[in-house]
Every structure is written in structure tokens, then in C-alpha cells.
Amino acid sequence: MSEYKNNSNHELDEMNLFNEFPKPTVNEWRDVVEKSLKGATIEEKLVTKTYEEISLQPMYRSEDLKNFRYLDSKSGEFPYLRGTNQLGYIEEPWAICQELSISSPEEFNQVALNDLQKGQTMLHILIESNYLSLYSESTIEDNHMRKGLLLSSIKDFEIAFKGIDLEEVPLFIEIVHGGLGFFATFISYLNQQNYDLKKIKSFVGMDPLGDLVKFGTIPYSMEEALEIMADITKWSVSNAPNVETINIQGNPYHDAGGNAIHELAFTISSGVEYLRGLEKHQVSIDDIAQRIRFSFSIGSNFFMEIAKLRAARMIWARIVKELGGNEASQKMFIHSRTSAWSKTIYDPYVNILRGTVEAFAGVIGGVDSLHVSPFDEPLGAPDEFSRRIARNTHMILDKEANLSKVVDPAGGSWYVESLTYTLAEKVWELFQKIEELGGMYNAIQAGFPQELIGITAEKRAENIKLKKDVFVGTNIFPNLQEKKLIKRENSNCSKPNVQNSSNHKSYELEQSLKNFSEIQSFENALIAINNGASIDDLDKSMYLLKTGKPTVRPLRIHRGAEPFEYLREKSEEYKNRTGNSLTVFAANIGPISSYKQRVDFVTDFFEVGGFQVIQNSGFSTIEEIVETYKLSKSKIVVICSTDDHYAEYIPALVREIQKIDLNTTILITGNPTVEEMNLYKNLGVNDFIHSKINNYEKLVELLLKGGI
């Protein structure tokens, strides 16, 4: 013991040695840094503005946290900033909850059994409705809807879940357009299989607000949607207490190009709308809140995504507490998926790296369940290889990186804590604006979320086209030699088993459907299912008679890389049609040091649009350039050299090129003065290529000029 004490004193003495050095002030630090910036200020060079309008500082200090509450709270303590469990993932690991985008029940069963044996711990099922006439086909396609499982009858459930013990395997089921018919069929299946409903730990959730803003419509009024949710929730409370029934999706706001503030404010506002709406239907706040599951996307801004999840728990806990919810109700359950918006169809293996970083942020932020996007997800239904890689990403983060061994590893970081609270304050401001509009439903009807997200999405799109925001392999460093993965259709090997869908329905079925259409309760739905009704039967009985269906402007769900992917596709179509690639001739003049950096820039500039840049080792005379250009048959020439050489070479070079083909587009690398630009344009130069121009728009212009 004395030896330990002596060692401790020695360590303290070593630490106290730092007291011999003067402690610099912030102003002294600023002076030193700004001297190295050669006259620029820290704010001009080192402060980064995010899409959330948060200014990220180059350095954070403990003083930055002096006005923030709850910094001393522990994991498992209100407001659950550091997680809802005292021991974090040591107590309960995050669920490996991979989406299975498979349509046929037979194939779903095969894939589910395979993936459960190989590490998946929760089955995440997207349900695709057969009653898609509720929505226009164009809306569904435009919104990049992920295809889901087609289940129409109890027979389909038997096929899909054969050999899967649902008392042991939890389900995460997202229902597309409603819930009553599907939920009743699911419960009827569980009863027929003699499951103990109290042992079923699953989520079968509907989110009418999320569906409304995604599709632009829902097949019932909002009040009717709340009635359905209340009916299902009350039945669940009494009969299947571990089955959650309310889904709140943040993914549509993220996938439309929104920022972290939008995603949090709109999902939390939706949660408050459901709390208030279901309370009016005699469901207690505790019964509602404990059956809500929030779904968020995890984007590429690593620390912002960590802060987003921590802020979400804190804000929700405080709201539910103020509304009278108990301790269990204050705990937010968070499911997350790595971003669909950030993935690309070109150089798709880079998606593995993107998904890993995003999943890392999700785990550090404290998700309860997680879907890691398979790298080929933008190309259709993922195959077995890509699903395996995605599952193994979970395993590496857990078993090799040991992230499950540390409680809230980001906690205490001055940067992360400051970002969390700053983000929370901005979310609260937007939440209050939504409250002033009368809640989330009114805000959606007024187009408020759509407008805000549209503004941010436009900023993102502009930065992507300017290459300020980067997609490696797509808008920088493309690989024109890559073997493109083939797009795959989602499997639909067999049609769903629709029971009693003919005109010869039994008297019992006809009567039970009639009773259900008159009183659309869960109990009547269950009776109809037990008499042989399909989910479609219930949906048609329920929705065709509905009036007052809301219609709003939907969000534009898309991926960020799509503009440049479109250019690549058009270039590939041209090559397939003509047998020739689009080419650009690089006219490199002078010694290699005078053009190397610029020709590298030009190569990347054009290859992101699918153009092949004809490379060379440089030319010493105009005659050499002209002779080589003749052989290239290219319609675009880019002159690369230093600015001071252009005045010497350009007049004669442009003249000789135009003698060969007057329609050749002649470009110069560099950003000359206005006077020089006018001079060169008068000589026949078409435009100038440099880092400040819009890469995408210039390539579109050239493709249009070429008739492509």
C-alpha cells in the first residue's frame, strides 16, 4: 500500500512539472495562429459553417460548456444525454437490425434464416402494400422507395416465418400505408401458432405523418389515422405489452437533403403530435410514449451525427417529463440506418467505407438498433455477399473495435458536448416554430418542412456540383475503367397468397367484412381475418370509403450523387450507341512543371462526367500539338500551361485548331483577369476551366453542345 502511495505521489509530482510553464491565454494563442495565417483571421480561415448554421471552432475549452446543464449526469440518468442504460452496451448491445428488401415470402424465409444464423439479431421488414393504387406510381418511383415484403394473408405469414421462433427473434416491421389490417393478420398468425403474446418483443409501427410527407397523401384523414393508432396501441397494452406500435421516421427528412436540425425537430414534433392525438382517444401518455420507436439516418458528418442522437434523447426526455410521462416513458428508443442519401452507384465499394464511418457514429451516439446499408443498396436488392459485409461491420465495431465495452465514449469531449447542446438549442427553436403553426400536421399541410428542407437540399446540390462536397469515385477521382455492377430488381418470385379474394366469399367472411366496414375496430378486423379475410380485403373495406384524405407536396427523396451519376450514364449511353467514348484532348505546352497540376485537375474535371481525357507527355511546339490533335478526332481541346505562357501560345494555337475544325470547343485552364478573358475569347477561346466554376453545369453544357 505504501509503495502504491509513493508511486502515486511520484506521478503527481510529474504532472505538477507542467506548472513550471506559463499557461497561455486564448488571446495569446490567437496571436500566434493568426501570424501563421499571414494576415487572415481565425474566423476567416479556421471556422467552418455547417448546414445547420453552426460555426465549428478550431479549438474548444471547458469554458465553452459553462452554461450547459446535465453535463454531470450519468448514463441511465435523466435526461439520458449519455444513454438510457446505466452500463450502455455492456448491459444490452445494439440490435443488428438489417433491412431485408425481399418481396416473396418464400425467399424472405430463406434469407432470414440464413442471416439470423450468421449474426443478425433482429429482423427488419419493410412491408409493401398490395393496395398501392392509393398512391401514384410516379410518386413512389420518384421517392426512391425501398421495396418491401408482400404479405397478404396468414398463409404468407406462415411461409415467411417458417422455422423462426418469434418469441426469441424480435421483429422491426415498418408498415407503408396503415396498420389495422396488417396488425390484425400478424396477431392472428401469432395466435394460430400458439405463441404467448406477452413474450413477443417486436415493433409493428405506423407513421401517418411520415407517410404523408413521403408520398404526398395517406388513405385516411389524420383523425382517422390517430383512431387506428389508438385502437392498436390500446389492444397491444392489454394483450401484447412488449409490442410497440408507433413509428416516427426521420429518414425522409434526411433523404430529401435536410440537415440534423430538420430531422430532429420534425420527428420530435411528430412524436408530440401523436402524444396529444392519442391522449384524446383515451390512451395514457405512458402507454403511448413507451410504444414509440424513432428512426434516424446517420449521415457522413461524423461528430454532428453523434451530437444529433445525444440531443434527441435529451430533448425528448424533457418534453415527455413536462407532459407528465414517467421515467420509462422519458427514454427514447432509437433505431438508425446508415444514410441512403450518401451512397453511390459508381465505385460502389466505397459505400462500405461510408457505411462503416456512419455506423461508427451511430454506435458512439448510442443507437438501440442499427441497419448498416449494404454497399450495393442503391442498385436494388442487396445480394448475400453485400449483406454479409454489412453484418460484419457490426461485428467489427463490437468485437474488434470493442465499442460495446465503453459507456458513452464521446461524453466529456468539449467539442461533442458543445455541439450537442448547440444543436439541441437550434432544434428547440425550430420545434417552437412548428408549435406556433399548430403542430406537425399543420406544418406539413402548409409546406413548412418541405420548404426548409428544399432550401438546404439546394445548397447541398450546389456544393456537390462545385465539388465542395465530395463523393469519392463520383464527383472526384472517378474510375472510368470500373466494371459497373448490374442493377437488380427486388425479388418477386411468387405472388402473395390471397385468401378468398374471389367473388364467392363465405357468408361469415362477407358478414365480418360488412361489420368491419361499419365499425373499423381492431377486434372486428381480427374476426374478419379469422374468417379468411386478406389484408387487401380489409384495406379495401376500410380505405375506399374514406373521405377527407389529405394531399400535400411530398419531399423529394434522392441521393446526393445523382447529378454526376446522370452525366456518367449519358456518356455511357453515347459510347454504347456509337462505339466511341467522349474525348477531351489535353494540349500541354511547355515543361512538365508548367502543366502537370493543371492537367491533373482537367482530367478529374472531365472524367467525373464520363469524358476520356487523351493524355500525353507534353508538347514543345504548336506544330506537334496540331498534328496530334488531328489524329485524336476530339471535339474538345483544353490548353494547359502557366498563365504567363498563354499570351505566347494561344493566338497561333487557336488559329491552327480552328483551321482543322471551326466547331471545336477550345478551353483554357486557369482563371485569368477580365481583360485577359475578353482578349482570349476574341481570339476564339470558348471558356476557362478552374476550381471556382460549376463542374456539373459546364459538363452539361458540353454534352448539350455535342447533341448528347
Image (cartoon, rainbow, N blue to C red):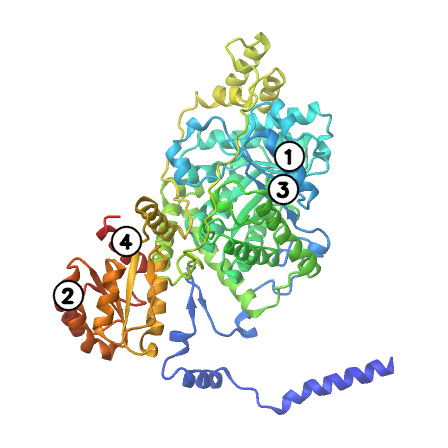
Q: Is residue 236 visible?
A: yes
Residue closest to the eye, 701 or 195: 701
> Which residue is denoted by mark 3 in the rendering?
290
What's the distance in space between the residues labelled 2 and 4, CA to CA? 21 Å
Label 2, residues with CA under 10 Å away: few <14, some 14-19, many ≥20: some
Label 1, residues with CA under 10 Å away: few <14, some 14-19, many ≥20: some
Which badge, 4 or 1, comes first in the chain's sequence?
A: 1
Circles 3 and 1 in contact, beta carbons < 8 Å: no
- Write the residue at 50% across / 10% down: 503
> Which residue is denoted by mark 2 in the rendering?
684
Query: Horizontally, is 649 left or right of 553 in the view?
Result: left
Q: In this view, which residue lies farthest toward the bottom?
A: 20
Looking at the image, residue 384 lies above or below residue 186:
below
- Write the residue at 26% across / 61% down: 631
Residue closest to the eye, 272 or 458: 458
Q: Circle 2 sits in a helix, a strand or a loop, which is it?
A: loop
Which badge, 2 or 1, comes first in the chain's sequence?
A: 1
**Closer to the eye: label 3 or 1:** 1
Which badge, 3 or 1, comes first in the chain's sequence?
A: 1
Q: Position of residue 602 (x, y in %)?
A: 33, 65
What's the distance in space between the residues labelled 2 and 3, CA to CA? 70 Å
Residue type of the residue flagged with mark 1: Gln
> Which residue is denoted by mark 4 in the rendering?
700
> Which residue is denoted by mark 1 in the rendering?
110
What's the distance in space between the residues labelled 3 and 1, CA to CA? 33 Å
Q: Position of residue 134 (x, y in %)?
A: 42, 28
Q: Is residue 280 visible?
A: no
Q: Circle 4 sits in a helix, a strand or a loop, which is it?
A: helix
Residue type of the residue flagged with mark 4: Val
